[in-house]
DNA sequence: CATGAATGAGGCTTCATTCAT
DNA sequence: AATGAATGAAGCCTCATTCAT
């Protein structure tokens, strides 16, 4: 391998690192102060880089936010996709999705804060790509629900779309409550994890029972 | 009634009218452009009053938003309170609440947009009073759910709080989808009304079946 | 006397009263917050009258200040004029002037604050009439000094103008120190009065000795 | 010296220069229009820099003024301190102080205008640090006077504090008269200098004679 | 790539003044 | 005369973005 390529590789690795640094900093700052309450300089300070450097990696403040959304949300969707494509029972799939969502919050609450509070509910969310990205989540959950209806695990007389919205909405508000501190979870890591698991099971429990096919 | 009182009343009626005028204008503008995207001058223009008059009635832009929240949300809570205090069956109460929420959106979508998008999900929402105001909704729905559990209409083995969050979250996301245009309802007024009613029934249907006490 | 005249008189008496009320209020407010720090509404509130009424009696905020200056300063000048025109010794005249200035501060510190701080040292003081009004004080003190030089009570080899400035400046700074609280006078009314008298005597003492004709 | 240090030094030198540029411009503008009559944009224009740059160097308009005061007044105090600490006769020291004050005005009238008119006599002057800074001048002059009393050069039966106030007040009003144009000095530079020297000598002359120890 | 000084448009807020009652 | 609602110009400050080094 020629030396230049080596350098190239290292350079772009550094480049990627700085970019990620800024992105992570932005998540922290946005989570703390909200998009409008955060200055580009706050992000730079948090990242420990110079003011203007942010503009080497991102066209503008807006792009930082949408990049966060695109990258993080894509990763999240991939995980949901994996669950939806699996061969588990419908109930297991739904529990997995619920646990995934709640667990991300447990581990990276700032990510969720920004995704949920700053992007999902923001003016700029009207942009078609972002609408599409969220619609994708509805589709994936919809796939799980509809396959459950097809297999007879779930009753078929109810609108799948409303059911999806209900399932996602339940988890969404659960998380929002946590973000806003409407609910406080106390205890050590293990207790926390257990609590979230139980919430996931309850939600899925109600949902499944409600959607359960009756004989 | 003395003439002066009459005048007094009329004057303060006019005063209240102007205030309401500005508040309504603010709702329109906030719904259209979001809080941060709206200028105070936009509100004044929309209300058809002079720039400075806004500051006669409100300390600053922020106060306009929180006033909207306080007044509109209080009205909404009163309605929910009325439902919760009634003597209907649990199912009827839940349908009423769901229909109320969805119907407000049908009739005054801007109110809901502002309440849901600009306040509920905003930085300033962290203020204790607003947290409390939302918690109140959880309490009222919680009252319905718990009384249903007590009467045996609903199963008692599930956490009431999670159930509440689920019910409200389902409706919240349903509305958010509508606000964001993720879902589009087409048709005339009667069709619209019918659609929302069906959504309410589906949500309550799933919820009730899921929560239904089993023999 | 016809009734109408009576009414006329009463009306204008009321008119004069309201005007004085506003003027007094303005002095208090200006003394407390400075000219620029005072709002017209503050003055109205302090006077206990309606907002717009101020504009019935005064063309604008500026006119309130200049009116205070003209009326209060004129009264002060009259008193100095009386002293200067008397037949006392030069020393007695100077002690009287010094005591007058210091005593006004003792009794009506707000007047002095406004005259000294807000008018004398303000941009708008550049207006010719006000320059003239202050120059008049210099002239009156100058008259005392020059008559003392003429009578042989004061040495004649020193510039009368510089001497005047010195005398007035000494008292001015003495008062400014009091206004700013650089010096604090403690004690009851009698002690206070005595203190100011002593200051007056010291200033005049130094000044007289310094200006004293030598044999 | 490493190159980086060199660059560092140059950069911060440039930084300091811009700051000084703005400060000097502010003095000109404040002297011309007064603090309240000056807009931040006026200062920026006068300095030939962009509006926003002012806010890189100063928190707000207010801070510009207090910075001027702190820096310029400190320099002035140092000069007075030098005089007070010298070994000259009391009379020489007082003449030096008087000449210093008058000469600063001769050379940098804007400085004096701002220090005397905008700061010393302003609302914000009430801030403790500024009070202290002025008190310092009183202390320094007080030291000269008291050492004169101790050495027998000045009579000891008069209150040193009142004497100080008298001396400083005399010079202060002399300068104020000049600032306000109550007195106009005409002539070329040499004549001007001579005039001010004579004023200084007159003031000190009266003061010394008045304070002179008698046998 | 990195820095942070420089730019300037944009928007909130204040408040003197006017006006309708 | 009296009231206080209504007006809108003016100015401070913020901060995203650019630029020179």
Image (cartoon, coloured by chain):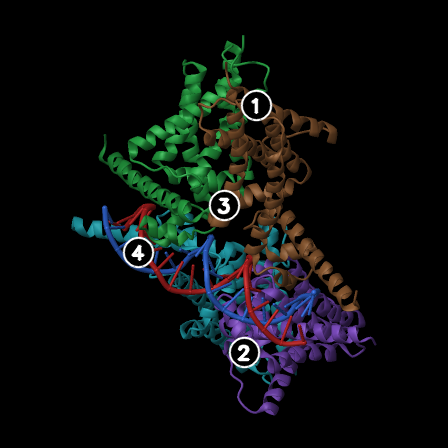
Chain colours: A brown, B green, C cyan, D purple, E blue, F red
Rendering quarter of residue B5: top left
> Do the residues under discs 4 and 1 have CB atoms within 8 angstroms?
no
Residue B163 picture location, percent across and down: 55, 23
Q: Position of residue A22 (x, y in %)?
A: 66, 55
Cα distance between the residues tagged 4 and 2: 38 Å
| Front label number (2 vs 3) | 3
The mark closer to the camera, 3 or 1, is 3
Read off the chain for label 2: D
Q: Which residue is mark 1?
A: B161
From the image, tell me which residue sits under label 3.
Answer: A132
Residue at 44%, 35% in the rendered image:
B175
Can residue C108 be seen in the rendering of this structure? no
The residue located at (79%, 64%) in the rendering is A1
Chain identifier of the residue bearing label 1 in the image: B
Residue C161 left/right relative to A5: left
Q: Is residue A190 above or below residue C113?
A: above
Badge 2: how crowded within 10 Å, few (<14), some, or many (20+)?
A: some
Label 4 with label 3: CB-CB less than 8 Å: no
Q: Which residue is mark 4?
A: C56
SS state under label 4: helix
Residue at the spot of label 2: D178
Of labels 4 and 1, the one closer to you? 1
Which disc number belongs to residue B115? none
Above or below A51: residue F2:
above
User: Marks 4/1: CA distance?
Assistant: 64 Å
Callouts 4 and 2 on one subunit? no
Specify the subunit that label 4 lies on.
Answer: C
């Amino acid at each position: 391998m020629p030396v230049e390529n080596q350098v190239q590789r290292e350079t772009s690795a550094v480049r990627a690192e700085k970019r990620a640094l800024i992105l992570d900093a932005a998540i922290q700052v946005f989570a703390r102060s909200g998009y409008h309450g955060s200055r580009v300089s706050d992000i730079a300070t948090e990242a420990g880089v110079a003011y203007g450097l942010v503009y080497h990696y991102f066209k503008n403040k807006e792009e930082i936010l949408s990049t966060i959304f695109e990258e993080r949300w894509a990763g999240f969707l991939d995980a949901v996709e994996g669950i939806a494509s699996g061969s588990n029972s419908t109930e297991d799939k739904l529990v997995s999705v619920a646990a995934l969502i709640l667990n991300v919050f447990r581990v990276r609450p700032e990510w969720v804060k920004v995704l949920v509070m700053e992007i999902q509910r923001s003016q700029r969310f009207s942009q078609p790509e972002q609408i599409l990205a969220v619609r994708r989540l509805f589709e994936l959950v919809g796939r799980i629900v509809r396959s459950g209806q097809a297999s007879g695990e779930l009753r078929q007389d109810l609108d799948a779309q409303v059911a999806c919205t209900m399932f996602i909405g339940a988890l969404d508000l659960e998380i929002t409550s946590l973000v806003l501190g409407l609910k406080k979870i106390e205890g050590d890591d293990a207790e926390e994890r257990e609590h979230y698991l139980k919430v996931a099971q309850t939600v899925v429990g109600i949902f499944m029972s409600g959607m359960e096919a009756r004989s």
